[in-house]
Image (cartoon, rainbow, N blue to C red):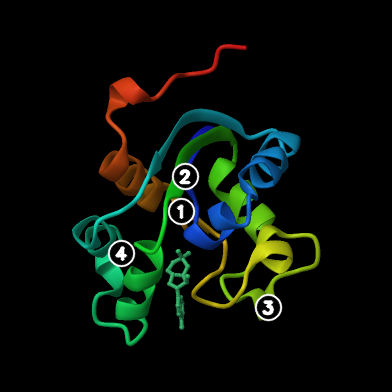
Amino acid sequence: TIERTFSIVKPNAVAKNLIGAIYSRFEAAGLKIVAAKMLHLTREQAEGFYAEHAERPFFGGLVDFMTSGPIILQVLEGKDAVRRHREIMGATNPENALAGTLRADYADSLTENAVHGSDSAESAAREIAYFFSEGEICPRTR
Ligand code: CMP
């Protein structure tokens, strides 16, 4: 089934000029970019996006990091996009990420782990709607 997932190139990866390298991995895997924008998140935006983690001990540090510089947000579309994107990213903790994954190659730490991706189709729908209006998504017909 063709589905959509939500992806972030995090501030450390943008700072290291890795936007193109990361986009190349998506495209090589057959994931199509159907929406994209650059933002420097406010604390309010970051706290809202990660609200499910609000009680976790790492929340403050996560919000500090995610507001430390610009990020690139995108919607990816393709067959089994949620699962395929997670495979390309590798494990959240780069120490556990398989060789050749984005986090193995580009993460600096558990917090500064280079990329974010939705963990389910339900999360994807919520996360996409948090940052994109339907009119900002451009279905790919070829
Ligand atoms: P992400 O996929 O964006 O979802 C939540 C983020 O919190 C995660 O990637 C990491 O960047 C960050 N994080 C920091 N510490 C932890 C932790 N102990 N467990 C999970 N996520 C963490």
Image point (31%, 53%), residue name: 41
Q: Are marks 4 and 2 in contact (CB under 8 Å)?
A: no
Q: Is mark 4 within 8 Å of ligand 1?
A: yes
N-terminal of the pair, mark 2 or mark 3, is 2
Q: Quadrant of the C terminus?
A: top right
Quadrant of residue 90 within the rendered picture: bottom right
Residue for badge 1: 118
Extreme-right residue of the structure: 99
Image quarter hosting the N terminus:
top right
| Numbered circle sitting on residue 50 | 4
Q: Residues within 10 Å of mark 3 (few under 14, many from 20)?
A: few
Q: Amino acid at mark 3?
A: Asn
In the image, residue 133 above or below residue 129: above
Q: Which residue is mark 3?
A: 96
Q: Residue at x 63, y 58 (%)?
A: 89
Crowding at label 4, few (<14), some or many (≥20) Cα neighbours within 10 Å?
few
Question: Mark 3 or 4 closer to N-term?
Answer: 4
> Mark 2 = which residue?
72
Q: Which residue of the protein is positioned furthest toward the left in this rendering?
A: 44
Q: Position of residue 7 (x, y in %)?
A: 49, 47
- Looking at numbered disc 2 in the image, what kind of residue is underneath it? Ile
What SS does tag 2 mark?
strand
